[in-house]
Each structure stands twice: as C-alpha cells, then as structure tokens.
Amino acid sequence: MTLRAGAATPAPGPPKTGTWWGRITRVLTLAFFAAVAWFIVRYARTVEWARVWEALIGTPGQVLAGAAALTACSFALISCFDLLGRHYTGHQVPALKVFKVNFISYAFNLNLGAIVGGIAFRFRMYSQLGLDNGTIGRVMSLSMLTNWLGYLLLGGVAFLLWPLALPPEWNVQASELRWLGAVLVALALAYIALCMWSPRRSFMLRGHELLLPPRRMVPLQLVMSCGNWMIMGAIIWLLLQGQAPYPAVLNVLLVAAMAGVITHVPAGLGVLEAVFIALLAHRVPEWQLIAALLGYRALYYIAPLMLATLLYLWFEARTTRPRPPRTP
C-alpha cells in the first residue's frame, strides 16, 4: 500500500508520545535498549579481543572477495526498489538518477537510521529532481513496503521450516517459533490477497488513505525483497566460513533486523552483535562470530557509506550549481 499523493494527505509518522500506546512503546524500547547495552558490556569484558583480531585478519582473501561481491549484488538489488515507485507513479526522473537516490538513501539509512537516511535524504534529493511531496511519499512508502513484505514472508517461512536451535537456557520450544512463523506468513499472504483480488484499491487507516499497488507488481516485490534478505544472510554465512548452517544465520539476521527497528539504534550498532552472540555463541566460538560481524559491518555498512557520501556531495554540487544569468 502507498499513500495517495496530495497536500491534504499527511505523511505517516510514529505514534504520538502523548497516547498510552506511545508511552508503552517508549518504555519497551528503553527497556530493550538497556538490556542490549547490559548484554554488550557483559560480553565485551569476557571477549578475547586478541583472538578476534587474529580471526579477522586471517579471513581468506577469497572469502572477503565473495562477501564484497554479494554486498554489491545486495545494494544493486535494493537500489532498484524505487524503480517500482517510478513505474507506479509515472514520474519522469531518469531511472539511473532514481537508482543513485535509492543507493544513497539506503546507505545512510543503514548507518544513521530511517528518519535521516530513508526519509530525509529521499525528500531532499527527489525534491531537487522536481518531484512533489505526494509523489515522493508514494515512492518511499512502496519501497519500504517492498522491503518488509519480503521480510514477513521469508521470516515466516524460515521460522516454520528451520526454527532456530536456541540456547538451552532460553526454554523456548521450536513449536512456539513455528507459531510466530505462521503469523508472519499469514500477514504476508493477507497483503498479497488484498493486492491480487480486492475490488477496493484504497483503504483509510487512522486518517491516511492507503493505495494498493498494481497486481502485476506484487510478484516482483516478493522476488526483489526476499532475494535481498537472502543475500544479506549469505554475506554473514560466508564470513563465518561454514561455522553455522545458512538457514540458522538467516534466521538470526531476521531477528536482529527486527530488534534494530525496535530499538531505533542507528546502524543497529551493538544490537546486531548482541543478537548474534545470544543466538549463535553456543554453536560458533565468540571470537570468530565477532570477527565475522566486524567484517560484515566494514563491507555492508562502512564501505557503502563512504561511496554514498561521495555520490551525495557530487549530487549536491550538480543540482545546486548556480545557473548563469540570462542575457537580455
């Protein structure tokens, strides 16, 4: 679903902090963040950092090259998400420029958070390219929906077919994870059913009009999003060099992604590591796990951010360059 273009339609936002739901959300977020911080400090004191560094610099060159290639594939794929919005809205910004805007905003989104990267950068750049706020909102919301649609379906299937082997002290059964997987799949299927067969193409939700995308776009949304999440899991799995099975790594990545959204921590800093340590440390030595995650951050977060920064500076220089005065 996407927001209808127009000045009368307000942009979606977080719940108001004055409501009871807003207060509960803030308390739960702070509690989760505190738990993650405590977990990180506790483990940081026990980690053998010399072994972490040894494992990191000892990573074979072919592994790093493969992970770098997968990172490029992931960014190339997710940078096409806004092209769906271009086709849907019919705006005339060239496809290559849309690709660049998507790449820059995604890189900043990963490192600085959705508000700064996913929203502010998109509005800034698309506005300079001539799009109105309504069209930008529809492009952005369709891109975000595409990303999380794949998450729901892939995460649900992963929990159903390959439930995590959780640490024994957690006392969580595989059947409980399968129930969670069933709920995620049901949500994804409900959206797909609405898009494919609903006679209504718009719905009102808390004062916002939501539009369903064309039916033919749904399979493409699923393929692009699921493919990107699977590539991201493959990057970490490759850096772990077979120390854990791929389905388990993918499962943990999906859990870490949701934890990062809940805590609103920029770049999921510490959250990603805490979740992986909690769920895989009983299967993979901690120093190897941390070394792989540091390599993942360098390849998937820092390197694209450096490139995106250069591209953004170039974009600003090109779009804000003063025009020569017209001769009378």
Image (cartoon, rainbow, N blue to C red):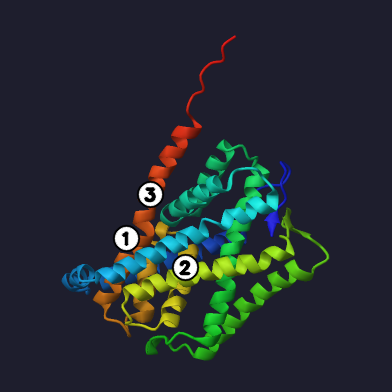
Callout 3, which amino acid?
Leu
Residue 5 vs 317, above or below: the answer is: below
Q: Label 1 neighbourhood size at 10 Å, few (<14), some (14-19), many (20+)?
A: some
Q: CA distance from mark 3 to mark 1?
A: 13 Å
Image location of residue 178, percent across then percent down: 56, 86
The residue closer to the viewer here, 63 or 117, is 63
Work out whether mark 2 precedes mark 1 in sequence or the reverse, and give the earlier one. 2
Q: Is residue 289 left or right of residue 48?
A: right
Q: Label 3 neighbourhood size at 10 Å, few (<14), some (14-19), many (20+)?
A: few
Image location of residue 269, percent across then percent down: 37, 61
Mark in front: 2 vs 1:
1
- Specify the quadrant of the image occupied by residue 214: bottom right
Q: Is residue 315 left or right of residue 195?
A: left
Work out whether mark 3 precedes mark 1 in sequence or the reverse, and give the earlier one. 1
Residue extending farthest to the right is 199
The residue closer to the viewer here, 284 or 245, is 245
Q: Is residue 97 left or right of residue 108?
A: right
Residue 257 is marked as: 2
Q: Label 2 neighbourhood size at 10 Å, few (<14), some (14-19), many (20+)?
A: some
- The residue under label 1 is 298
Residue 175 vs 23, above or below: the answer is: below
The residue closer to the viewer here, 194 or 326, is 326
Q: Pointer 3 and pointer 2: residues touching (CB < 8 Å)?
A: no
Work out whether mark 3 precedes mark 2 in sequence or the reverse, and give the earlier one. 2
Q: Residue at x 32, y 82 (%)?
A: 243
- Specify the quadrant of the image occupied by residue 46: bottom left
Callout 2, which amino acid?
Ala
Q: Is residue 133 left or right of residue 6?
A: left
- The residue under label 3 is 307
Q: Residue at x 55, y 66 (%)?
A: 225
Callout 1, which amino acid?
Ala
